[in-house]
Amino acid sequence: MKVKTKRPVLHNGEIKTEFTTNEQHARELETKGLIDKVPAKADDEKAGEEKPSAKPRARNGG
């Protein structure tokens, strides 16, 4: 996940404002106030949506 910090930070021995990190590290940076809110994953957004139900099948014979 690519993140952009509000101010320069030391990451892997280099001073940067943009870098790639994992989701957990991004959440830690968010709690410290170094980055804006971490964007939600596409999978998480889809999990909240309801799946369309299948059409009920017609019964034969009455």
Image (cartoon, rainbow, N blue to C red):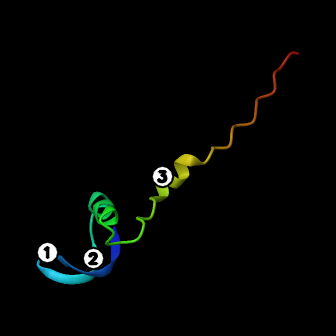
Location of mark 1 (residue): 12
Q: Earlier in the sequence, mark 1 or mark 3?
A: 1
Task: Say which of 2 and 56 sits in front.
Answer: 2
Question: Alpha-carbon neighbours of circle 2 within 10 Å: few (<14), some, or many (≥20)?
Answer: few
Q: Residue at x 44, y 64 (%)?
A: 39
Q: Earlier in the sequence, mark 3 or mark 2?
A: 2
Check contact, mark 1 vs mark 3: CB within 8 A.
no
Q: Earlier in the sequence, mark 1 or mark 2?
A: 1
Location of mark 3 (residue): 44
Q: Is residue 42 left or right of residue 26?
A: right
The three-letter amino acid code for the residue at tag 1 is Asn
Q: In what element is the residue under mark 1?
A: loop
The three-letter amino acid code for the residue at tag 3 is Asp
The three-letter amino acid code for the residue at tag 2 is Phe
Q: Residue at x 53, y 47 (%)?
A: 47
Q: In what element is the residue under mark 3?
A: helix
Question: Distance of mark 3 from mark 2, alpha carbons?
Answer: 23 Å
Quadrant in which the C terminus appears: top right
Quadrant in which the N terminus appears: bottom left
Question: Distance of mark 1 from mark 3, alpha carbons?
Answer: 29 Å
Residue 19: numbered disc: 2
Check contact, mark 1 vs mark 2: CB within 8 A.
yes
Against 34, residue 52 (above or below) is above
Q: Is residue 28 left or right of residue 49?
A: left
Against 23, residue 53 (above or below) is above
